[in-house]
Amino acid sequence: MVDIDHFNSVNDRHGHAAGDEVRRHFASIVAARIGPDGAFGRIGGEEFCLFCGAEDIAHVRTLVERLRTTVETTPCGGLHYAFSAGIGAWDGQESLASLMARADGLLYAAKMADRNRVMSPEEDALA
């Protein structure tokens, strides 16, 4: 689960057209780097869900960290933005809703920890 940080302030300060451009910019970065085994989509507002075919959570974390760094260092026009993410690993049996709820909980933790960060199950186990 991925959420663009402080997105409402983008809309408030620069207008909804700028917000739309940020979402398109973000989507183009993800699409260019997700690989053939991945899929992603917008699930509402500034929130996206990314699915990776990787079996190793460390690989997924590396991919999402690279995306985060790319977004942070590649402004949309002159506008800089960042995102926070929560990673959930599917156990092979749980429902999609359960997986997304776990990832969303980690996303919330990332937002509470100053944003612009990726939280994975390892951090959850330490909490």
Image (tube, rainbow, N blue to C red):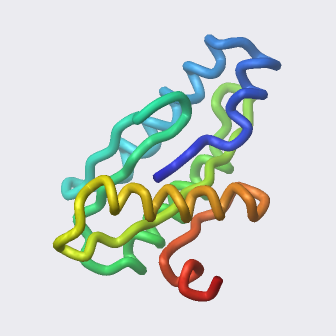
Residue 18, horizontal then vertical, whole percent? 65, 18
> Left or right of 81: which side holds 60?
left
Which of these two is toward me, 47 or 30?
A: 47
Name which quarter of the figure residue 10 lies in: top right
Q: Residue drawn at (65%, 62%), measured in percent from left and top?
A: 110
The residue lying furthest to the right in this view is 13
The residue lying furthest to the bottom in this view is 126
Q: Residue drawn at (63%, 22%), measured in percent from left and top?
A: 19
Which of these two is toward me, 29 or 124?
A: 124
Residue 118, horizontal then vertical, whole percent? 58, 65
Which of these two is toward me, 76 or 4?
A: 4
> Left or right of 100: which side holds 39?
left
- Work out whether 19 lies above or below 110: above
> Left or right of 95: which side holds 43?
right
Q: Residue drawn at (54%, 61%), measured in percent from left and top?
A: 105
Name which quarter of the figure residue 80 lies in: top right
- Work out whether 3 lies above or below 10: below
Which of these two is toward me, 45 or 54?
A: 45
Q: Residue drawn at (51%, 49%), measured in percent from left and top?
A: 2
> Left or right of 102: which side holds 21?
right
Residue 87, horizontal then vertical, whole percent? 45, 65
Q: How many marks?
A: 0
Residue 23, horizontal then vertical, whole percent? 53, 29
- Work out whether 9 lies above or below 2: above
- Quarter of the image for the C terminus: give it: bottom right
